[in-house]
Image (cartoon, grey):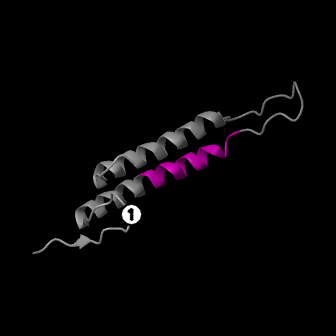
């Protein structure tokens, strides 16, 4: 049986992908979308900034928003590298 190949996008440096490569990319994207959803849920627990100096902190679960945003950025970077590992684009950019 002949393997299905997807057409080459009209972008310099891209190549034709097999169905297995497309499926692998979709798996990576689904996994990282789930990570993104989890980080969005965590962000709901980031307390608002104090409205005045010395305002008491919010009780309960308080998440560091900077850490959540760093996690989001690094997860997006990891997803990009995972997909780049699959597509193996040519050239520098």
What percent of the width, then of the height, locates residue 24? Answer: 29, 58
Residue under pointer 1: 11
Residue at figure coordinates x 64%, y 44% from the top left: 43
27 horizontally vs 39: left or right: left
Q: Is residue 13 above or below residue 70?
A: below
- Does 47 sit left or right of 37 as displayed? right
Give the tally of numbered discs: 1
Q: Nearer the viewer, residue 37 or 80?
A: 80
Magenta residues (range): 32-46
Query: In which quadrant of the rendered view does residue 42 lie?
Result: top right
Q: Is residue 22 above or below residue 38?
A: below
Q: Residue 70 sits in which quadrant? A: top right
For this rendering, which residue is in front, 30 or 20?
20
> For the point 68% across and 34% down, which residue is it?
62
Question: Quick one: SS at disc 1?
Answer: loop
The answer to whether residue 2 is left or right of residue 10 is: left
Where residue 54 appears, as percent x and y from the top left, is 87, 24
- Apparent side of residue 88 relative to residue 43 in the rendered image (left or right): left
Q: Main secondary structure of the magenta part?
A: helix
Question: Is residue 33 inside the magenta stretch?
Answer: yes
Image vertical order of residue 87 relative to residue 56, above or below: below
Most foreground residue, 48 or 79: 79
Q: Residue at x 66, y 46 (%)?
A: 44
Residue 47: image x %, image y %?
73, 38
Q: Does residue 78 sit above or below 66 in this rendering? A: below
Residue at 41% in and 48% down: 79
Residue 44 among those drawn in magenta = yes
Q: Residue furthest right?
A: 52
């Amino acid at each position: 049986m002949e393997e299905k190949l997807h057409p080459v996008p009209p972008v310099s440096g891209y190549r034709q992908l097999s169905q297995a490569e497309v499926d692998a990319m979709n798996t990576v994207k689904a996994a990282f979308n789930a990570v993104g959803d989890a980080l969005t849920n965590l962000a709901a627990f980031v307390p608002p900034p104090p409205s005045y100096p010395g305002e008491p902190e919010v009780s309960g679960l308080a998440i560091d928003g900077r850490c959540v945003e760093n996690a989001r950025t690094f997860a997006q970077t990891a997803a990009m590298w995972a997909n780049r590992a699959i597509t193996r684009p040519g050239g520098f950019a």
